[in-house]
Amino acid sequence: MIKKIILLALFFLESLLLFASDTVVNNPAVAARKRINIFVTARCSNLDWSFTLRLRARLRALFDKGSFFVIAGQTDSEVADKLIRLMKRKNAMIGSIWFDSHGHYGKGHSVFDLGMTGFSYESLKDNLQTKQLRRMAGFFDAATKIGIGSCYGGATFEFPEIENLAARKMNGDSLMIYTSMLFNDATVYASESFVMMKPGVWKKEYALAGYPVNRRFKDKIYLPVWKRLGQWNRYSHYTKLFERINTVCLDKKGDIRIEGIAYLNIKKYNKKQIARLKKLKKGRFNASLAFQQKSQ
Amino acid sequence: MKKIVQAFPILLLSLTVLAQQDTLITEKSVITWVYTKQGNMLKGVLAGRSGSYLLLYPGSLKEKKKNIDYQLVRISFENITITKTKKPNGLVKGQLLGGSIGFAPVIFGEGGAYVAIITFPLGVVAGILIGATSKKKYLINGDYTSFLSFTDKFIKP
């Protein structure tokens, strides 16, 4: 009889603890206590170059157990599942989260991917498409920093006119605004230009700024991107301020920081940019990507 | 009667227009690079010809095999300057040619054979690299006959 009572008491205690861990997410006092940083990256089914980055991130996370975590997933639902599981286990809120992904310039608008699922400002308006993002939103608040790690993720310029397609806005600002709104007024950081993942990403260096060396990026259509190397934007729906900021970097714990000097204000980088701008030519970018529209 | 006579040329004209708009599809999937007069490059899979327009599938061969349904890009022949296609079996041809050039020193006796130990694999590798990336160039420059002769090579009759 006594055994049964003890067992019942233990069960009751455990359920109380579980209840506490569920409610802690919405409690700002507790939320302020513990924050962890997350690096979200895609895990493709085929072997691709992103596995090296994943490896680097996991190595970094290994040395900062408890404050920095890496999540890799194929789809947005897989990422959401892993994130929710982690946050419940750690009983914490997100400090900084970095969505590492590719920007698809040919699409003519800013996007970021979660796994293989892409999000643009238009898809963020759709409740059906953002179902998985909204599941994660409980772990975000106004103190959370979100880094959109895709190239041109915060582009405010126009995608140049090509063939018979007219110039159109990249709408990176709208993407940032909708992202912040979706994730409980979190502060969103996104780049106007290329986002690199050079060695030393987690050393507060200019490893996120720079340019790729591939030939296809040296096309005149990329002119607005080359002009804005290392330029970043910040938006918070809490303050409703859209600001142009210096180059963003990550510290060793995966926290999003801002450099003291902008990338292009450094002489050697400025020189390199001028040299590259002179070498831009037409006919290197695959213009058919701008025509990629799925048949109705 | 006059009206019928007047309507006849219109009917004939519309028929020819209809005939021109017939879409002809390619026999094989060929990766094609199309350079336009504006200096832009469009890369895709050659899909066919529709009248005076070249039809290009704006995705990769993989995407085409997966049946990802993209709208075809229509490029007028007047806008095309150059087209390039990947050479068929370029890899094998390059490998054979590079290999045979690398093997050639054997003709010059024992000394040549020793040289061939190095030149043969080198030739094979170089041949593969050159063969796999080589393209065949077609000059069109807005000319309809050159456009037709280019498309006829890949299109079903």
Image (spheres, rainbow, N blue to C red):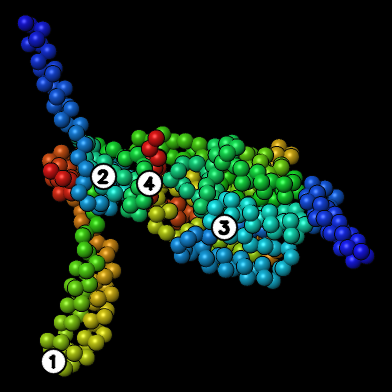
Three-letter amino acid code at the position of disc 3: Gly
Question: In the image, B5: left or right of A195?
Answer: left
| x 62%, y 60%: residue | A71
Task: Give the numbered dot on residue B68.
Answer: 4
Can you identify the residue that label 1 sits on?
A: B109
Which structural element holds mark 4? loop
Question: In the image, B64: left or right of A191?
Answer: left
* Contact flag, marks 1 and 2 (Cβ < 8 Å): no
Task: Give the numbered dot on residue B47.
Answer: 2
* Contact flag, marks 4 and 1 (Cβ < 8 Å): no
Q: Are marks 3 and 1 on the same chain?
A: no
| Extreme residue toward the right, this view | A2
| x 27%, y 79%: residue | B122
* Contact flag, marks 3 and 4 (Cβ < 8 Å): no
Asked if one can make out residue A266 in the rendered structure from this viewpoint, the answer is: no
Q: Nearer the viewer, mark 2 or mark 4?
A: 4
Chain at tag 1: B
Three-letter amino acid code at the position of disc 1: Gly
Q: Judge by depth and name the residue closer to the eye, B81 or A237.
A: A237
CA separation in Å, label 3 and label 4: 23 Å
CA separation in Å, label 3 and label 2: 35 Å
| x 63%, y 70%: residue | A59
Looking at marks 4 and 1 on the same chain, the residue that comes earlier in the sequence is marked by 4
Dot 3: few (<14), some (14–19), or many (≥20) neighbours within 10 Å?
A: many
- Indicate the quadrant where residue A40 lies: bottom right
Looking at marks 1 and 2 on the same chain, the residue that comes earlier in the sequence is marked by 2
